[in-house]
Image (cartoon, helix red, strand yellow):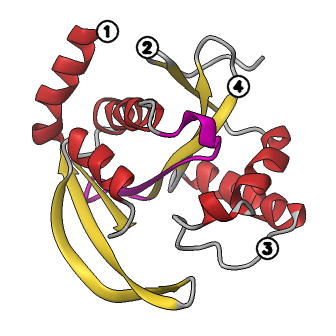
Amino acid sequence: MFTPFLVGRKASLRAVLEEDLPIMCSWMNDPQVNAFLSHADAPLPLSHEKDWYQRYLLQLKERSSVGFAICEKETGKLLGSTALMSINRNDRRAKTGTVIGEKDFWGRGFGTEAKMLLLNYAFNTLNLRKIDSEVFLFNERSIRTQLRCGYKEQGRFPQHIFKNGQYVDMVSLTVFKEDWQPLWGRFMAEW
């Protein structure tokens, strides 16, 4: 088992490993998971995930992205992934995305905990000040998670992405460090 980098109550975040790719590829090809992903619109072979991983390693080296595997703390089971992307160290901002690929773990708080751990890393380790996210308007679970983590809606993009035969709206959300910090204090107190 790989050593966790960030540990919460029930979730831990660790490095994304090459051996994770077959599981991650299966998530990308699962229609129920794929329905919430803006970038996945065709069946993806494992070679695609391997190409993505090589690009990710380059971005990690350049310090423009950092990603984590989300695991169940007790068992180490891989549940999903989360990342900071397009890290801009001058403006101290980044974009984020999270997916819980294991559907048995949907609605159980793992996404919220992973997001809080990721934001703590972004704000208190990388010294970022602002994190942006975009999500489908119909992805109510993701929107609720982000609002619980301190994000605020910044705007909507009507009919922005073509998904499942129709144009769907996107929601832009942002969280600033100063808005997130009180939530982190409460999160830690409950720990």
Q: Position of residue 14 (x, y in %)?
A: 61, 28
Q: Which residues are magenta?
A: 86-106
Q: Which residue is mark 1?
A: 191
Which residue lies at the image location 39% right of the left edge and 38% below the top edge?
115
Q: Residues within 10 Å of mark 3 (few under 14, many from 20)?
A: some
Magenta span contains residue 89 = yes
Q: Position of residue 10 (x, y in %)?
A: 49, 17
Amino acid type indicated by mark 4: Lys
Which element type, helix, strand or loop, lies under badge 2?
loop
Residue 9 can be seen in this image: yes
Which residue lies at the image location 80% right of the left edge and 69% below the top edge?
44
**Sequence-first tag of 4 and 2:** 2
Q: Which mark is residue 9?
A: 2
Rounded to the nearest angstrom, the CA distance separating label 4 from label 2 is 15 Å
Rounded to the nearest angstrom, the CA distance separating label 3 from label 1 is 40 Å
Q: Which residue is mark 3?
A: 43
Q: Are marks 2 and 1 in contact (CB under 8 Å)?
A: yes
Q: Which mark is residue 6?
A: none
